[in-house]
């Protein structure tokens, strides 16, 4: 675990050092859980968004996009349930004055039981060697059995308390498990209170005062309230989807793990409207399609898993997360939810406007059911960064830090490097840049020795380096160096476009989704 913590720290500092992610307002000592994307980060982020957008809107002729405003009528958040129920249970430690999410303290405690069990298993595996039978060991070892029983009892108690919204019971669990504040080390806890996660602000200034509006905590509601507009103007027939990418805001109580949990973040959400009764079939279909989208990036199938929810929101009849193995464990990157007709029905009720679909095949009016796919851009970014970061030991004993980014998502696709800054090589290199730059993000670099320049490109994940040398002037060939294998091949300048395109085009990625 400590080793994984170190790796994660290195990734965070690499992200800053190479212009991917900066803490927000850094010269003013930062703003907690808010981050800025730098010159390379913004390109990677835009490429992720383009991959998602094209996969939704180009590959599905029944999915269209919108871009709704962040500010919306405040009644929308009453109708959606966010005003009354978008809460986290918080608890304060009276000595450190630090605030925590009560559910997270308990989840951390559960994780500690799991760690202890895993340690016992690892110790025994080492002791018994090849003859070790894990299942038998877990079923017979007293210590492991005791830890498992305590863990399962805690899990059950916690699930019931969360389901019943029982804040006193959450506090009692913290007391009974003797959970201490990580800062003060004491158990001097306040009561547990609900804390609404929406940011509020004021809009307008009239004689009657201003109106309280919210910064949206999800982009989904912008889709629901535009359902009729899109269905009618686009003459959409069910099943169809509406996709949107945009900022969302949550006043998270505990913000941690870098860009994993932020107060301002970006979502890519798609609401797919279906006939009542067909929602679970579509839910299964979208589960499969979304995992395929992730796996097509080639970061390793073993890094993903589904986490089906036992505890469902009152309006959902199925929900699953796609989790990714981050250095701090498997974590949710995307949620897929079968939201029934809850949202559209609520907006119909609160707005007084009829929100229905006339199904010409069934000759029937109904309120469509919805399958939602919701993925955080920043979490996706983090999963890619974590999976790509590598410190490779080279045969000459040196270490190179490289980002094995999926080539179509890399911020820079190729770098053109004149071997020396004279003899007409810079001019020839510039000529090549001027050819490639219309189709690929292309860098030109002439400073420092060639090896150093390769390392700099490796560190930002550039798939190809093109070296221009004296031979180039004679036969119009260059050295094409591939990032991952470091293999160098002599190729004609005329072939560069095709060679690069085959590896870095988004279309090559999208074709895998067919
Ligand atoms: N409309 C459904 C919805 O918003 P969610 O599970 O609350 O569902 C969806 O959020 C996704 O948004 C998550 O899977 C995660 O990737 C991202 N997300 C949620 N809260 C976040 C936060 N505080 N910081 C970064 N990403 C977040």
Image: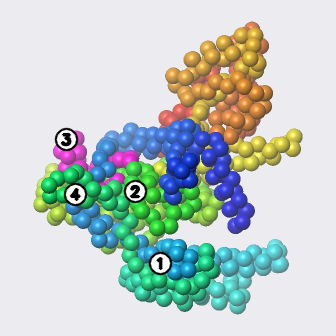
Left or right of residue 126: residue 436: left
Image x and y of residue 279, in percent = 31, 61
Are there few (<14), some (14-19), or many (20+) residues within 10 Å of tag 1? many
Left or right of residue 344: residue 498: right
Quickly name the residue at label 3: 233
Mark 3 vs mark 4, CA separation in Å? 31 Å
Are there few (<14), some (14-19), or many (20+) residues within 10 Å of tag 2? many
Q: Earlier in the sequence, mark 2 or mark 3?
A: 3
> At 39% from the left edge and 54% from the top edge, which residue is drawn?
248
Mark 2 vs mark 4, CA separation in Å? 19 Å
Quickly name the residue at label 1: 91
Q: Nearer the viewer, residue 287 or 6?
A: 6
Answer yes or no: disc 1 within 8 Å of ligand 1. no
Which numbered circle lies on residue 211? 4
Frontmost of labels 2 and 1 is 1
> At 47% from the left edge and 83% from the top edge, which residue is drawn?
190
Q: Are marks 4 and 1 in contact (CB under 8 Å)?
A: no
Quickly name the residue at label 2: 249
Q: Nearer the viewer, residue 466 or 35?
A: 35
Magenta residues, start to end: 219-246
Which numbered circle lies on residue 148? none
| Residue 224 visible in the snapshot | no
Q: Earlier in the sequence, mark 1 or mark 3?
A: 1
């Amino acid at each position: 675990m400590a080793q994984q913590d170190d790796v994660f720290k290195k990734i965070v500092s690499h992200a800053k050092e190479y212009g991917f992610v900066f803490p927000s307002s850094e010269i003013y000592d930062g703003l907690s859980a808010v981050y800025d994307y730098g010159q390379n980060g913004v390109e990677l982020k835009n490429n992720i968004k383009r991959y998602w957008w094209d996969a939704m809107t180009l590959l599905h002729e029944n999915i269209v996009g919108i871009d709704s405003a962040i500010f919306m009528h405040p009644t929308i958040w009453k109708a959606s349930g966010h005003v009354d129920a978008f809460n986290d249970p918080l608890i304060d430690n009276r000595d450190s004055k630090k605030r925590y999410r009560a559910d997270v303290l308990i989840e951390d405690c559960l994780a500690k039981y799991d760690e202890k069990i895993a340690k016992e298993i690892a110790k025994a595996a080492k002791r018994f060697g090849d003859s070790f039978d894990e299942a038998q060991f877990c079923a017979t070892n007293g210590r492991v059995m005791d830890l498992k029983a305590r863990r399962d009892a805690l899990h059950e108690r916690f699930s019931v308390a969360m389901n019943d919204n029982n804040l006193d019971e959450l506090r009692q669990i913290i007391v009974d498990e003797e959970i201490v504040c990580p800062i003060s080390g004491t158990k001097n806890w306040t009561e547990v209170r609900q804390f609404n996660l929406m940011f509020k602000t004021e809009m307008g200034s009239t004689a009657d005062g201003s109106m309280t509006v919210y910064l949206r905590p999800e982009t989904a509601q912008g889709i629901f309230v535009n359902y009729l507009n899109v269905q009618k103007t686009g003459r959409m027939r069910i099943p169809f989807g509406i996709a949107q990418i945009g900022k969302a805001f949550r006043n998270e109580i505990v913000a941690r793990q870098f860009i994993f949990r932020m107060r301002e973040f970006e979502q890519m959400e798609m609401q797919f409207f279906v006939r009542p009764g067909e929602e679970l079939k579509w839910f299964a279909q979208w589960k499969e399609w979304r995992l395929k989208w992730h796996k097509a990036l080639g970061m390793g199938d073993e890094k993903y898993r589904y986490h089906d929810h036992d505890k469902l929101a009152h309006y959902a009849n199925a929900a699953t997360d796609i989790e990714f193995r981050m250095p701090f464990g498997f974590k949710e990157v995307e949620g897929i939810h079968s939201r029934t007709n809850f949202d559209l029905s609520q907006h119909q009720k609160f707005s007084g406007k009829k929100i229905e679909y006339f199904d010409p095949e069934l000759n029937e009016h109904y309120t469509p059911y919805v399958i939602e796919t919701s993925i955080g851009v920043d979490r996706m970014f983090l999963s890619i960064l974590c999976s790509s970061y590598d410190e490779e030991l080279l045969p000459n004993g040196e270490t190179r830090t490289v980002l094995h980014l999926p080539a179509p998502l890399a911020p820079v696709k190729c770098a053109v490097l004149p071997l020396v800054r004279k003899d007409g090589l810079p001019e020839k290199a510039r000529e090549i840049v001027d050819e490639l730059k219309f189709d690929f993000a292309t860098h030109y670099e002439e400073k420092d020795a060639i090896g150093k320049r390769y390392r700099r490109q490796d560190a930002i994940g550039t798939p190809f380096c093109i070296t221009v040398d004296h031979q180039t002037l004679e036969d119009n060939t260059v050295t094409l160096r591939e990032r991952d294998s470091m293999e160098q091949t002599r190729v004609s300048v005329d072939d560069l476009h095709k060679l690069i395109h085959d590896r870095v085009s988004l279309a090559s990625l999208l074709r895998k989704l067919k």
